[in-house]
Image: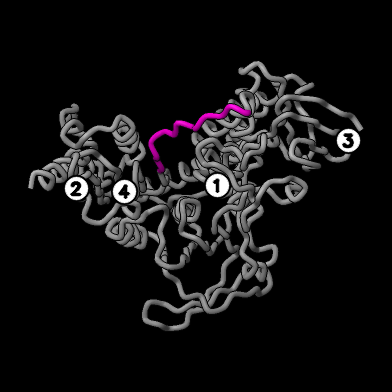
Amino acid sequence: MTTIQTDVAVIGAGTAGLAAYRAAIAAGKRAVIIEGGPYGTTCARVGCMPSKLLIAAAEAAHELRHTAPFGVHVDGQIRIDGREVMARVRSERDRFVGFVVRGVESIPEADRIRGYARFIDNTTLEVDGHTTVRASRVVIATGSTPTLPPPFQVFGDRLIVNDDVFSWQDLPASVVVFGPGVIGLELGQALSRLGVRVRVFGVSGSLGPLTDPAIRAYAARTFNDEFCLDPDARVTEMGRDGDQVVVTYLDREGRSVTERFDYALAATGRTPNVRGLGLENTGLALDARGVPLFDAQTLQCGNAPVFIAGDANNILPLLHEAADEGKAAGENAASYPQVKPLARRAPIGVVFTDPQIAMVGQRFADLAEGTFVTGEVSFEDQGRSRVMLKNRGLMHVYADKVTGRFLGAEWTGPRAENIAHLLAWSYQQGLTIAQMLTMPFYHPVVEEGLRTALRDAAAKLEA
């Protein structure tokens, strides 16, 4: 058994863990980073990047099928080679992972410990029985894994999560998706566009991250024009028949329908990776999931010299948030017992469906009724959107009735990923609707739709 003394021990070499390690080193502290799994972040290996590779292939297929309205005719059958699609997904995914791995391997070898860490006490860790790490402070950055609700276990090895999709050698004929959240919507639509028969089931009417009822209803209608989506499904039975999964549900008329699929994809959320960490050996208070109770501003667990960052704390499981949290946790670990709150950036989220979904600032559900006005625009007749035949979308922007300050937005529509950044910058600067309308809008661009929504909000503020 090797014993290592260090100022800061970081558990997990993902986005948050790497940021925490580098922040501690930059603060002049001795730090080690411990990882038991393969190097490579969730984003690069099984998240953002491979999913966008699959979506890019799906978009190519979709565009080829919809050229006729422009007078451009693609004669002959469009052939999708599933093996070639997945070969590119895996190849480019491995390239992105390679960049991350090289970054980790650039860390001095003495600072990298391979193995799974387990707490012996608040600041003592045992790594796979071969190393004891005695640290002054610890950062937990162990990420998360897909949640698999027990009823789905009936599907056996035909039950998959998004991680499994990116290891496919070929595309299946059919997939049932449980969970119309970000992952379920993105993968469901992409697979459908690549010729896979897809049905997406949800509960309680939820759809992606949307909380605005009007935007959510519009998005549901739009996606249903393309693939089968039931955000409030009534599934009555699930089972397995040979190599297929069997799902029985009630359709909109209340009739019982049974369908068979090659796979069941569970996109029902993610769970922090804290099991097996031995947190019961610490003095930390834990919640019902076994996650340490922590201050969302400082990321400190109680009064202990322990901090938790990234997907492991499940506040905002997004790459840029994980990077910011990791840096803050590393800095606070280095300066402990002096800690400072993390200055969070403007909330921003994008779903890479078509049309895209985006949210910026405060959500509709977070706003007190009667305190704000809503500016609206439909992209159905928006100039540039109609030119491109991308004219599907509805946007709501929210403004404070008293100050006129821009509070947030929820929408679905074209180029939402770009518009979201303009709005996030405006929100972070505390701009009013009037100030935003003094900014330039070129013609003809999709962003002119945003201007229409802002003008609608300004008129309601005046009234």
Judge depth for marks 4 and 3 and give the one in front: 3
Name the colouring of the figure. Answer: one colour
**Residue that mark 2 sits on:** 375
* Residues packed near mark 3 inside 10 Å, few (<14), some (14 to 19) or many (20 plus): few
Q: CA distance from mark 2 to mark 1?
A: 31 Å
Task: Residue at 15% x, 34% y: name it.
Answer: 434
Q: Residue furthest left?
A: 463
Span highlighted in magenta in the image: 337-349
Residue 30 in percent (x, y) is at 72, 20
Q: CA distance from mark 4 to mark 3?
A: 50 Å
**Residue that mark 4 sits on:** 410
* Nearest the eye: 91 or 343: 343
Q: In this rendering, would 456 be left or right of 182?
A: left
Label 2 with label 3: CB-CB less than 8 Å: no
* Residue 329 visible in rendering: yes
**Which corner quadrant of the image does residue 129 belong to?**
top right
Question: Label 3 is placed on what type of residue?
Answer: His
**Residue that mark 3 sits on:** 130
Q: Residue furthest bottom?
A: 255
Q: Residue furthest right?
A: 1
- Mark 4 vs 3, N-terminal side: 3
Q: Of helix, strand and loop, which one carries label 2?
A: strand
**Which corner quadrant of the image does residue 72 belong to?**
top left
- Mark 2 vs 4, N-terminal side: 2
Give the position of the N terminus as an image quadrant: top right
**Residue that mark 1 sits on:** 314
Question: Label 1 is placed on what type of residue?
Answer: Asn
